[in-house]
Each structure stands twice: as structure tokens, then as C-alpha cells.
Amino acid sequence: MQKRIFPCLALLGLVFVSACGSSSDSTKVKNALKSGKTTTTVAATTTTEVTTTTAATSESSGSYDSVICGADNGEFPDLAQFPGAGTGFDAPKVTVTCNSDTMTVASNGIISYPFVKITPAGLKSQNFSWTVSTKPTIASTQTSIENKMSAVAFTVTGLPIYGPMEGPTPTVEAYGDPVYNDLLDTCGGHTGYNADYHYHQIFAISACSLEETIVGYALDGFPIYSNPSYKWKSGYEKTGNPKSYSFKAYTYTGGTNSLDECNGQKQDDGSYRYYITESFPYVIGCYTGTAKKQSGVAAQSMPAMGSVSKSSAPREDSTLASQFVTQTTILCNINQDDLDRL
């Protein structure tokens, strides 16, 4: 049975291709280049710190490159396969730089599905750059994100993930639960004051350019997994009013098939993974590892949004999927022998 390839090619311009694997029999990926293609997406190497600016794709063959990097080998998809934010917006661009110890993900913060304006802010390109460990370890104590008003994670599509609370305004909803207060679009995100798109909730569906697999990484380096049929449950119960101060409105109680306080669990091999859940804290409740300190735009605090428009669309997966054109991803393959060697 064939598996997806671990990409190790850097494409520069239209014709330069160089293999980055250390082995002499590194598999080469074949891509038919389409003239005039302007969408810029993920391109990187998995063994060296070589990045490129544009990944070539072939719409006619349905073939797209993806990049494998990070703890548990997360897949960063080629965003050219998705429709983009719409007319007048920049194309989404993500560049992954990966070596044996760290992964850096740079992004212009543009979504790869149609933009729906939920907050007064529009959508503009940003200059995000996150660096995390590819070999995260569980810390001796958990670290709260209750007062962290900036990104706590990012998706494999290069978008920031915030905690389960909003900013200080309006006062009546200060630090409230944005899901409970119906402030998000049908993919679980919205834009902040700086026209910066970010998530508070994640849906692992093609309509949101995500699959049932690793959907992102926390800043402590641990992967964030999808949660098919929400098998794993949040261990938090609503004990107050989440309209404001969401962390005070939920209490961790645990229970059958429940995750820990950080919304994750330790694996049999000693590793750790977070899971998305349909209820608070939705993605991350605290850090299990030690988060790397970020800088620049990626570390900016959540600004006040002002008034917002309410989203009335239901959030069931079937409804979400029907609102967008579902794209089929066909990725390059590698023989099992080659996969084992990697």
C-alpha cells in the first residue's frame, strides 16, 4: 500500500528542482507546471533550512505538493488546491522551514476559503512567523493561557489560533466565549482590529481547508489533532455565564473519554497531542509543554474589536461543507520501502 510522500523538493521559478534528501535515491516529485499560475503556497524542505517562494501545481493533473514537518509529521497542504478568500484579496501564502530541532512557519494570514465579514474589520495580509520545537517535551507543570491575549497555536494552513476568550470590549462581553457569543464564521474564525484573521474554534473539514488529521501546532510544539465524531470529550462543564470571562464560566470535572485540562492526552509512547473539541476550550485550555516565545506580529495581543455582526449559520459539518466547493486532494506517493527509510 502506498503512502503520501514526505516532500523534499524545493521549486524555484519554473524549472529548477533540487532534492533535499540525504540519500542518493531520494524520490523526485513530478509536477506539470501551469503557465501564469500566481497562487503562492507552502514550499519547503524537511531536512534543511531551504525555503522557496512559490510551489508549482498542476490543476490539469490534480497533483499538489504538501510539506511534512513537526512533531508526529504534520502535513502542510499546498493551498493552491483551495478557492482562496475571494476577488480582491491576496492569495494565501505559507512557507515552512524545517530542520531536525525546529520548525518555522511564515504566513501572510490569508484564508484559503471565501471570506465572510463577521467583525467590522476586513481581511488584509499579515506578516506572521512562528517557530516551535519539532521535539517537544511534557513540562513538569501546565501553563495557563487564561491571560494570554495572543496566538497560542497556528494551523497547518498558516493561520493563528487564539484561546477560548475574546478581548476586553464590549464591556458586557469582556473576555467572553466567542463561540457562546456567536462571534465567529462557519469555520470558527474572524478578523481582529488589524484585519488579522484568527481562529477560536477549529473544524477539520475540506470547506475550511483542513482534513481529519493534524490540524495545527501549539506554540509548545505539540500537535493539534482533529477529533472524528468528537470521540474525545472536553472535560469542562459550564458552571457560569460564558458571555463574559469565559475561563470563570467553565469548570474542569473530567469524565469518560474526557481530555485533560489542556484539552489533550499523553500517548502510550510518551508523546502528547491536543484535540479539537465541540465545546470549551475548543482547541487548547492550557500548555502541556513549554511554549517558545514568539516575536513580531505573531506575538501581538488581541486588540479590541468593537461591535460585531452575529453569524446565524449553523455549525454542523454537513452545512459547512455545502457552502463551499469541496476540493479533492491528490498527493504524490512513495513506496512503503522509501517511507520506512525516511
Image: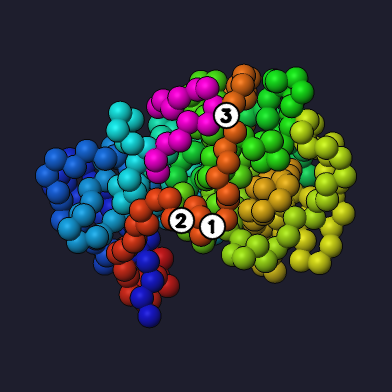
Q: Nearer the viewer, residue 339 or 34?
A: 34
Q: CA distance from mark 3 to mark 1?
A: 22 Å
The answer to whether one can see residue 73 in this image is no
Check residue 114 for magenta coloring. yes
Q: Secondary structure at mark 3?
A: loop
Residue type marked 2: Ala
Q: Amino acid at mark 1?
A: Asp
Q: Secondary structure at mark 1?
A: helix
Looking at the rendered image, the disc whose residue lies closer to the viewer, 3 or 1, is 3
Residue in the picture at 74% in, 27% down: 173
Kindly identify the amino acid type of the residue bearing the numbered disc 3.
Answer: Ser
Circles 2 and 1: CB atoms closer than 8 Å: yes
**Could you say which quadrant of the image residue 153 lies in?**
top right
N-terminal of the pair, mark 3 or mark 2, is 3
Disc 1 target residue: 317
Residue on which the image places disc 2: 321
Q: Which residue carries the number 3 mark?
A: 309
With 163 as the anchor, is 64 left or right in this view?
left
Residue 299 in the image: above or below residue 21: above
Q: Earlier in the sequence, mark 3 or mark 1?
A: 3
